[in-house]
Amino acid sequence: MPLPSMKDIEPTQLTLNSRFKFRCHKGVKCFTQCCSKIDILLTPYDILRMKNRLGITSEEFLEKYTYMHIDEKTSHPFALLKMSNDKEGKCPFVTADGCTIYTDRPLNCRYYPVGQAIHKKLEGKKTVDEEFYFFVREAHCLGYQSDREWSINEWKVNQGAELYDDMNREWKTILLRDGIPGQERLNDQKRAMFYMASYDLDRFKSYIFGGRFLDVFDIDRDEIEKIKTDEIALMKFGFKYLKYILMLEETLKVKKEYLKNNNQ
């Protein structure tokens, strides 16, 4: 979903069973209006799908189609989709006939007009990460006038958002680190590493296999071979790496030989 104005968000937190009426198609007068002059935050899996759809590297995709936004509260760097530089400010992938990369469109576009977020919740003595939902009702949107009824879960399945949620869930939990005692703002170096491991998969792969990374960390041979050829595995390894450098979990182990040589 594009990042909406707060005035367009209904404050009620919803569940997968919450119901609503909505339908978007070319016959609706507002068709594609929600794809202009907006901020669309991209997830790691969004970029993997989109750069492969276009047949370009992650670095090329990021340079041509995105800009970086640094969140003031968390200091996390995010990739946002760059709108066309004209008076309409349209998404570069949208035409009068709709989205040209529809089957590989970002997660937030899939959810619209539903918004999805995650927060920490206390259950007994245990803190858990809970996903919740909300409606976005923009003034121009006529989709709510439809008689087609959905539960949020039905909409999620229909729009292919389940796979995207599964792929990004671990990354989203990392974003909640600001609620963990002792977590500090990212310095420039960690911010660059966060951005690379999240979004620039091709560069992250070069970082692993083109330098001393494998001399430092004790990585299982099967995992090494998998991340060489499987981008999904590489992306998930990036999440593991982020947890390690942000000191959220000891997800990686330094080789004993490396520790011995550097302690002499």
Image (spheres, rainbow, N blue to C red):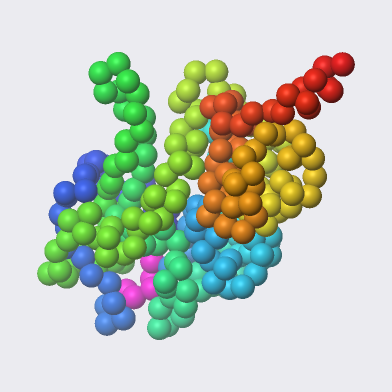
**Residue at the limit of the structure toward the right, as seen here:** 264
Q: Is residue 11 above or below residue 125?
A: below
Residue at screen point 74% across, 49% down: 209
128 or 86, which is in the foreground?
Answer: 128
Residue at screen point 46% across, 33% down: 176
In the rendered image, residue 32 lying in the magenta stretch gets the answer yes
250 or 106, which is in the foreground?
Answer: 250
Can residue 34 be seen in the rendering of this structure?
yes
Q: Is residue 218 above or below residue 164?
A: above
In the rendered image, residue 168 lying in the magenta stretch gets the answer no
Main SS type for the magenta part?
loop
Residue at screen point 44% across, 66% down: 105
- Quadrant location of the N terminus? bottom left
From the top left corner, tell me how far across and down residue 155 is, in percent: 24, 60
Can residue 78 be seen in the rendering of this structure?
no
From the top left corner, tell me how far across and down residue 121 is, in percent: 31, 27
Give the residues in magenta: 30-34
With 137 as the anchor, is 210 left or right in this view? Answer: right
The picture quadrant where one finds residue 71 is top right
110 or 91, which is in the foreground?
Answer: 110
